[in-house]
């Protein structure tokens, strides 16, 4: 009986799509994207819309002191923490219509579906809008879920300033979204996040759903290469200590070392050359390095190889090369029970699916430190994201929303079996 009820709940693909297109107008860019930076007037407008929609479905909306919003639909048991689903409503400056918004609006659509069917869940169900996932206005990204999970301190987070000098805390007050609840005190039974893949794998393999089992590890480094500034006309080639030549070889080494492992990626994203004159041999270069792999041990090996090659480059060219690790995010393994719920949901909904890891950071990665969590991916065209051309079809969005709803219901059913007789 329960199984049949769950199978009969179908989300409304048209309404989900209409809501995606409607909210995309808040901060719309001429090229079809969205510029809705966190805690701006546009963000406030999107938040107000979300709050009104949730309240119209009978939900109670609470806001924590980092501005994250929780819209709760009661279940049979008020004493059990809610099963939550959601993502973020902020975007990059030239963001697309789906990154973040899909996860929140699909969750809202799931609530609509439960509401319409009069379906009573065992645990309360919540939709969450996490503040500042993107980190485009206030660095770092995922700041609110980071405080929620105890990774960042609240005061430190509220003191982050944008380029105009306005603080995160000040911006929260300005749009009226500094809530009364202390961030992190809001307990969750589980958290599910639907997101576009932001990569090419699902589309390339013709799969509908990505069952996300974890998030890859990431490490950031800064490297300083010191040589000698000398006259570009009078210094013979054998006498040079050219820091930029050393940097060029390091960039090549990062690429080559990462390529030895099929799942690893390595990037040099910033290169600053000093003194920066056409007729001076560069005496100093600063560069950044970003290494990622699902397995931190692989990053260790790449790091060791690059360090060894940098020593060789330094010896050969007469350069001092210093490498400093500036951040290290461990790999995340999502909760087996939540991943199983997503797998079951994809199967009973009739969608093709594959297991995968997330290549980007997401709120669910931080939330997983304090509550069982998992993610669902849907394909996006050409794997393009953080771009105004970002696109997933109506059917792809609907498939994700359907799996999200079914995963939450599957988890709820298992929670009821475990705790129902208490
Ligand atoms: Zn996102």
Image (tube, rainbow, N blue to C red):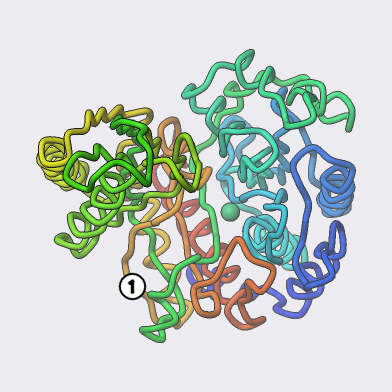
Rendering coords of residue 314 (x, y %): 16, 36
Rendering coords of residue 280 (x, y %): 42, 40
User: 276 or 211: nearer the eye?
Assistant: 276
User: 106 or 253: nearer the eye?
Assistant: 253
Residue at 46 percent across and 36 percent down: it is 366
Q: Which residue is mark 1?
A: 354
213 over 330 or under it: above or below: below
User: 367 or 80: nearer the eye?
Assistant: 367
Rendering coords of residue 393 (x, y %): 63, 82
The outermost residue toward the top is 155
Q: Residues within 10 Å of mark 1 (few under 14, many from 20)?
A: some
Looking at the figure, which quarter contains the C terminus? top left
Rendering coords of residue 102 (x, y %): 65, 63
Residue at 22 percent across and 56 percent down: it is 258
Residue at 53 percent across and 58 percent down: it is 409
| Mark 1 vs ligand 1: CB below 8 Å | no
């Amino acid at each position: 009986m329960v199984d049949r009820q769950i199978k009969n709940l179908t989300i409304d693909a048209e309404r989900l799509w209409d809501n995606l297109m409607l909210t995309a107008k808040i901060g719309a860019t001429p090229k079809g994207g969205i510029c809705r930076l966190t805690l701006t007037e546009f963000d406030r407008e999107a938040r107000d819309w979300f709050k009104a929609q949730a309240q119209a479905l009978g939900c109670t909306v609470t806001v924590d002191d980092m501005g994250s919003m929780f819209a709760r639909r009661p279940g049979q048991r008020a004493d059990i923490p809610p099963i939550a689903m959601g993502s973020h409503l902020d975007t990059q400056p030239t963001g697309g219509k789906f990154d973040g918004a899909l996860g929140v609006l699909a969750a809202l659509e799931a609530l609509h579906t439960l509401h319409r069917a009069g379906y009573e869940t065992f645990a309360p169900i919540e939709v969450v809008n996490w503040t500042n996932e993107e980190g485009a206005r206030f660095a770092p990204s995922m700041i609110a879920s980071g405080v929620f999970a105890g990774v960042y301190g609240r005061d430190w987070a509220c003191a982050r300033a944008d380029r105009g000098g306005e603080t995160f805390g000040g911006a929260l007050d300005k749009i009226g979204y500094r809530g009364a609840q202390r961030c992190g005190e809001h307990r969750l039974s589980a958290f599910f996040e639907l997101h576009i893949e932001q990569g090419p794998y699902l589309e390339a393999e013709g799969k509908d759903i990505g069952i996300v089992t974890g998030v890859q590890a990431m490490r950031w480094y800064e490297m300083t290469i010191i040589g000698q500034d000398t006259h570009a006309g009078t210094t013979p080639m054998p006498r040079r200590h050219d820091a930029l030549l050393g940097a060029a070889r390091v960039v090549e080494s990062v690429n080559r070392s990462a390529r030895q492992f099929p799942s690893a990626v390595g990037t040099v994203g910033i290169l600053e050359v000093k003194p920066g004159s056409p007729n001076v041999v560069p005496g100093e270069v600063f560069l950044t390095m970003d290494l990622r792999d699902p397995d931190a041990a692989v990053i260790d090996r790449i790091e060791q190889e690059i360090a060894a090659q940098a020593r060789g480059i330094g010896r050969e060219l007469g350069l001092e090369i210093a490498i400093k690790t500036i951040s290290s995010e461990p790999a995340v393994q999502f909760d087996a029970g939540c991943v199983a719920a997503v797998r079951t949901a994809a199967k009973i909904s009739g969608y093709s699916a594959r297991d995968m890891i997330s290549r980007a950071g997401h709120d669910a990665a931080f939330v997983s430190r304090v509550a069982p969590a998992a993610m669902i991916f849907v394909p996006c065209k050409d794997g393009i994201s953080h771009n105004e051309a970002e696109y997933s079809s109506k059917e792809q969005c609907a498939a994700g929303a359907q799996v999200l709803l079914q995963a939450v219901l599957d988890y709820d059913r298992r929670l009821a079996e475990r705790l129902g007789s208490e």
